[in-house]
Amino acid sequence: MPMPASSSKESKLKALPKICKLKCPVMNYAWGKMGSSSAVAQLSGKEIDAKEPYAELWMGTHHKGPAIRELGNNSEALSEVLGEELPYLFKVLSVAKALSIQAHPDKKLAEKLHAERPNIYKDPNHKPEMTCAVTKFEAMCGFRVVGEIADYLVEYPEFGSLVGKSISESFSAAAKGADEAAKKAQLQKLFTTVMEADKKDVSAMVEEMCERISQKDSTDDIEKLILRLNKQYPLDVGCFAPLFLNYLVLQPGEAMFLTANEPHAYLDGDCIECMACSDNVVRAGLTPKLRDTPTLCSMLTYRAMKPDIMHGETLDDCSTLYSCPIDEFELTVTRIPASKIYNLTSVKGHALVLIYEGEGTVKAADGTELKCGKGSVLFVAGSSHVEFAASSDIVAYRCATKGVSMQAA
């Protein structure tokens, strides 16, 4: 008689060590940093090709890039070992040039898109995400206040010419008023008009705008960004994005949380990302990939939204906790000096720990002990206490569902 599925899952979990090492895949997207300049390449544990971009390290159970547990000559996807999916996806990003102008759908829209176009939208899950800067990290996130955008329609005549006098005047009038619904409606109309504009018109206006900016004696940050985007994606409609979206620079250790249906584009730098277990991305600019402009323009909230910069909650002299208003994930960053013993106290759900720098050993209560170093990815079973002994300074990132965090021994 075959074993019931629940019994099979329970027996697997009982046999699972409290800690084990994982092999995790690398994504070689074109926007990634090249060769050994990429943190992803350095963490991959693989031979590095100097001519290859290394964009993302994926840690989790998503079917596009599942983590693998290897035992001798045998290997098994972590989801098969667990008999379930982790609720989060944990990543490292090394960004050399702008990612697409994009947003992630909420749960209801994700289910609809997956049902209608499963070949494009591969899963039915939402994708809220938190980004924590490892280096200086540049991004565009959320719409500017409408007054700023109205000013840019005048300051950048090419912008005004692309949308036309009627739409420009209607938007500017709404921006001066107090009707928030009207502001959102006019912003949607303005943004959609730009994103869906004729490609020849876009190319002509981007070329004029960049030519005019390049002849100026001095340029501000927004103008420099427009020129950079045009160099990376010549004459692309995304070159107008800095006039719509907030330009942010996160310093190392700063983080931000993005909910569904908010526009953003990462620009440059290295970061840690935690997100719900999904790869649903709706794109409409600055990308050679499929653009689903109608869906993007219809799904956005069109609220002025500049993400709050998070600095984390100090837990002790080693650890900082970054928490956000969802249950799927939280991030703990821990720095363990050489020769220090540090306890990683349990959380209810399973956790993944990335050793970003340093080396040492990690030991669980069941006696399992492993050597770990730069690039090690550790699975830590739920409710498991583990102890780190650092032989050199360790920097570790842990993604887990919300619960108890790291504490010193």
Image (cartoon, rainbow, N blue to C red):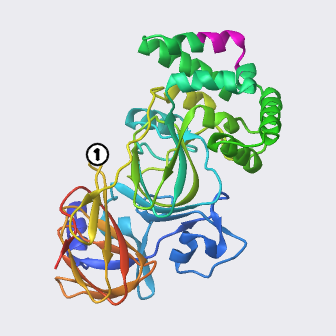
Residue 122 drawn at (x, y percent): 51, 47
Q: Is the magenta stretch mostly helix, strand or loop?
A: helix
- Between 209 and 43, which is closer to the camera in this rendering? 209
Local secondary structure at mark 1: loop
Q: Is residue 163 above or below residue 293?
A: above
Residue found 48% across the figure and 19% down from its top:
184
> Where, quadrant-wise, is the C terminus in this rendering?
bottom left
Res 199 seen here: yes
Question: In front here: 55 or 407?
Answer: 407
* Residue identified by numbered label 1: 326
Q: What stretch is highlighted in magenta?
A: 163-170
Which image quarter is the N terminus in?
bottom left
x and y percentages locating residue 210 in the rendered image: 78, 38
Q: Is residue 373 left or right of residue 248?
A: left
**Quadrant position of residue 33:** bottom right
Residue 305 is one of the magenta-drawn residues: no
